Image: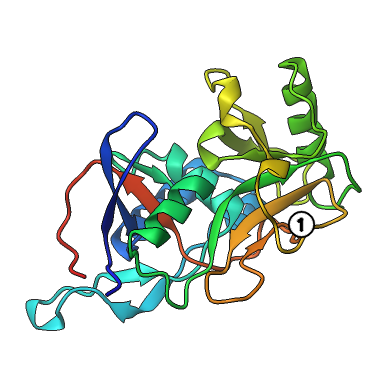
Amino acid sequence: MKHRQVKIENARGEMETVKRLTDPVVREYNSFVDSNYSSPLAKNCLHAFQSGCYPVTKPEFGITTRDVSGSSPLGCVQLQETGLLKGFRHVTRSELEAADLAGFNLTHCYVNVGLVLKEGKPYKDTENISSRLTSQLRRRGISLKGGRLIPFSALSIRESPNSGYGLTLSIKDDVSQDAFLPASDFKWNTQSEFALTRAMYFPELSEKWQTHHPDLYLSLGNVILIGNKEENNGK
């Protein structure tokens, strides 16, 4: 039986809950974006999330909470920066794999779990971002040989006129070196010639793990969170 929530053990040996993002958070997120960004391009790129078509609470109680059916790497980074997740964060690849094994319901689900950065071909809209992240990792003494898997929790976001999205990403100063795992340590079913790409999971495809998509704006997939706050969203 597949479940809407599962508990898995984190790296510190603590039990945490894995769940999907639902749309009440998205309404607050969109208000945050509108209030804190001035660039129309940046706002357009950050309005990534959409309410899904599957209610997760009963309408007879007047509640229309729904799963979020759209996401983007830029939106995921901004979402965690708003403070709206309240004890939750985006899952990493390893955490999502553990949740899948624990029976988490990933039916009709596609998930962004971070970015892969390597020495590769620049992509027009992300050239500024990939160059910035490359410089920041190299200053830390981190090699890009074989690529690095960057979790969303390691990134911050701000407006930038030099990016194709009106936004740029940076590595947070307080992030541990251990956060940037070698991408070559994981199996990827499809890869890309581009320097910066999404790390994506398609559990219902034969090519489950993909890193071939260089567009950080396109709004696809679900948002899967992990944290320590108890919620009763059913199974």
Indicate the position of residue 30 as horizontal and vertical percent values.
43, 56
In the rendered view, does 37 fall on the left or right side of 14?
right
* Residue sitting at x 45%, y 71%: 69
The total number of labels drawn is 1
Q: Quadrant of residue 128?
A: top right
Q: Identify whether 97 is placed above or below 63.
A: above
Coloring applied to the structure:
rainbow
Residue 28 image position (x, y, % from top left): 34, 53
- Residue 15's place in the image compared with 24, above or below, is above
Residue 224 spot, x, y in % from top left: 41, 57
**40 or 231, which is in the foreground?**
231
Image position of 9 with respect to 54: above or below: above
Frontmost residue, 78 versus 38: 78
Tell me which residue sits at (66%, 58%) in the image: 217
Q: Is residue 89 left or right of residue 206?
A: left
Query: Counting other residues with Cα less than 10 Å from the Cα at mark 1, is it few (<14), some (14-19), or many (20 or more)?
Result: many
**x 39%, y 43%: residue:** 89
Front residue of 57/208: it is 208
Q: Looking at the picture, tell me which residue is in the foreground, 216 or 194.
A: 194
Q: For the C terminus, give its image quadrant.
A: bottom left
Regarding residue 76, the answer to whether it shows in the image is yes
Residue type for callout 1: Pro
Q: How far across and how far down the image is residue 120, in percent?
A: 89, 45
The residue lying at 73 percent from left, 24 percent from top is 137
In the image, farthest residue toward the right:
121
Measured along the vertical axis of the image, is residue 231 above or below residue 23?
above
In which quadrant of the rendered image does the N terminus lie?
bottom left
Q: Relative to 187, is 31 on the left or the right?
A: left
Mark 1: which secondary structure?
A: loop
- Mark 1 highlights which residue? 214
Q: Is residue 92 visible?
A: no
